[in-house]
Image (cartoon, rainbow, N blue to C red):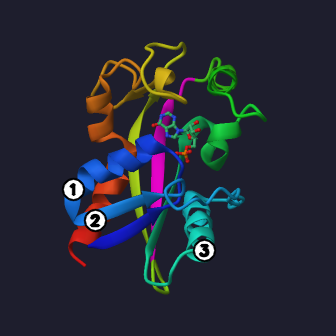
Amino acid sequence: MKEIVFATHNAHKASEIRNILGDSVKVKTLTDINLFEEIPENGNTFEENSFLKADFVRARVSDFTMCIADDSGLMVEALDGAPGVFSARYAGEPADDKRNVAKLLDNLKGVENRRAKFVTVITALINDKSYSFRGEIEGVIIDECRGTNGFGYDPVFVPDGYDLTFAQLPSEVKNSISHRARAIRKFVDFINNL
Ligand code: IMP
């Protein structure tokens, strides 16, 4: 059976990937392999950050194990792509979803162009090769919070083709169209064809 180490402690992310992968691949998290060191994440792009995380883990597991890592964020057109790779800590340390959303709405006050997209990049390292898979979903940022599901910027993001925010949509709907789901599906197609 193929085995993958996913560079996350987040059980939700791990189960999202397991659900799409099925039983043919075993996915272990950092918690499963007892790796609790802090992973550097100081790249300028989602590709760089996901590579850095996967590479950090690769150095600590066997050569023959596939390592994957993801990095995600929100890119707002009128803010030249911000908060981007700084999405988690947009309003400073410690990371705080409510303060991040408040800062975003503040920065978009009076701004007409509300276009934005969520992006996820998954990097997979297999032996000495690196592969990356990008998923995106486009939409708009509304000017107030709506809904209680999800996390992060979900209450202010309405995906194209819907009238509800990610935080109002049922989680099954968000999880079937999200940037993360799209990147995961690309990765799963790749690994199933290896
Ligand atoms: P991560 O790389 O998946 O940890 O995401 C970094 C940050 O981007 C999160 O802390 C959120 O602020 C934002 N983000 C990523 N994905 C989502 C999402 O699906 N909904 C809302 N915010 C998200």
Local secondary structure at mark 3 = loop
Q: Nearer the viewer, residue 164 or 167?
A: 167
Q: Assess whether mark 1 and mark 2 are in contact (beta carbons under 8 angstroms).
A: yes
Against 146, residue 136 (above or below) is: below
Residue type at numbered disc 3: Arg
Asked whether residue 135 appears in the rendered view, the answer is yes
Disc on res. 60? 3
Magenta residue span: 112-125
Local secondary structure at mark 2 = strand
Q: Position of residue 69 (x, y in %)?
A: 50, 61
Q: CA distance from mark 2 to mark 3?
A: 20 Å
Q: CA distance from mark 3 to mark 1?
A: 26 Å
Give the labeled residue for mark 2: 25
Give the labeled residue for mark 1: 22
Asked whether residue 124 appears in the rendered view, the answer is no
Q: Residue at x 60, y 65 (%)?
A: 48
